[in-house]
Image: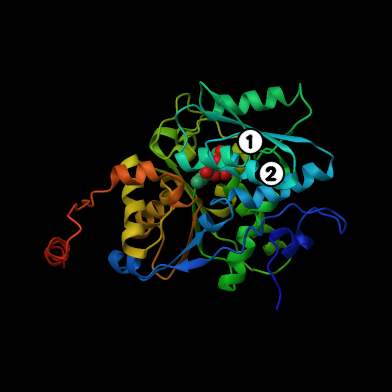
Amino acid sequence: FSRYTGLIDKYRDYLPVHDDTRIISLAEGNTPLIRLHNIPKLLQKEVDIYVKYEGLNPTGSFKDRGMTMAITKAVEAGSRATVCASTGNTSASAAAYSARAGITAFVLIPEGKIALGKLAQAMMHGAVVIQIQGNFDDGMRLVKEVAEHAPITIVNSINPYRLQGQKTAAFEIVEALGRAPDYHCLPVGNAGNISAYWMGYTQFADIGIVNKRPKMCGYQASGAAPFLRGHPVAHPETVATAIRIGNPQSWDKAVNAQQESGGWFDEFTDEDILAAQKLLAEREGIFCEPASAIALAGAMKDINNGKIPEGSTVTCTLTGHGLKDPDTAIKQSTTPLIKVKAELEEVKAAVLQNMN
Ligand code: F0G
């Protein structure tokens, strides 16, 4: 028997750690790659769609992959505090891993524009939560400025160790499939994750573990789609608050991933995003947050229109767990809540009336 102890232990030969590095881990990574059964049937297309369910990481998002590396290296360098700007998931992860390491986490979040679960996490893990009257991009600018004036380590994805950790998701997909997928679909916000996946696939191609890399397909919310506009967006807006970002920090890396892979960027409305989230939950039993569902919205559109041809193997990263944002889920749900007396007759009637 061997106990899984996290992605740094597993992939240490591919990561910048030393034998004596003290690893800060919550046994992140090793998330399931789930094959969709019902949605491909709905599409009436011969495609294999897999979802990489990153919501099953310790704090419920893919950020833990990057955070185990960033916090490990911060501690190794003697840092006593971390800081990040966040739409919620980075702050939850930074708070948890900083707690694990015994150092202080400062998190800057956009006031009123963060999903409730994520705020609860930052608070529970004892982060210093600074709500700014501005958006993620304002927070990012302030974090860079404040780090010049205080002895704190930035743990946003501009910290190079973040992408190093996040690239391991591509390694896991290759191991699960026995090869790279043909297409990899994922949401793009600050653009770190698409860059990290491309690094991972490229590293495995360079050392001959795979002989080809996937086309990288990055999807953005229409109200926050700088890659579609070709320039930063001043006032990003979307129900998918995780990707409510107008000025992505990893712009060049993401464009490189898209171009070098022969992939593309596309955009979806809030309505499309929520419909994909609901479809996945209803038809496959998989609950992801709105931002994550855009990966599936993208895959479905591009499978339907033939851009992704039949016979393809497609992976979609579901970046965060649906439980992060219960408000949006409940608000969009049309499922009636049936109220009855605590009596057999009424419950029986409710059951019989709703059989289909
Ligand atoms: N999906 C979710 C659930 C996210 O939280 C994020 C980013 C993304 C997708 C986009 O990934 O930024 O690497 O392109 N969330 C960051 C945060 C910005 O602060 O939690 P990206």
Are the two marked residues, 2 and 1, in contact with CB atoms closer than 8 angstroms? yes
Q: For residue 91, which quarter of the picture?
A: top right
Q: Nearer the viewer, residue 203 or 245?
A: 245
Position of residue 259 in the picture relative to residue 22 (left or right): left
Q: Nearer the viewer, residue 18 or 259?
A: 18
Secondary element at tag 1: loop
Task: Check the image and name the residue furthest to the bottom.
Answer: 1
Q: Which residue is mark 1?
A: 127
Secondary element at tag 2: helix
**Which numbered circle lies on residue 59?**
none
- Residue 242 percent coordinates (x, y): 48, 40
Kindly identify the residue that appears in the image at 64 percent across and 45 percent down: 96
Q: Nearer the viewer, residue 356 or 45?
A: 356
- Residue 271 percent coordinates (x, y): 30, 43
- Residue 102 visible? The answer is yes
Q: Is residue 295 above or below residue 110?
A: below
Q: Is residue 202 above or below residue 133?
A: below
Cα separation, mark 2 vs mark 1, equals 8 Å
Q: Which residue is mark 2?
A: 99
Q: Nearer the viewer, residue 27 or 266?
A: 27
- Residue 201 percent coordinates (x, y): 63, 59
- Ligand 1 image position (quadrant): top right
Kindly identify the residue that appears in the image at 69 percent across and 61 percent down: 6
Kindly identify the amino acid type of the residue bearing the numbered disc 1. Ala
Kindly identify the residue that appears in the image at 58 percent across and 39 percent down: 122
Position of residue 254 in the picture relative to residue 146 (left or right): left
- Residue 206 percent coordinates (x, y): 72, 62
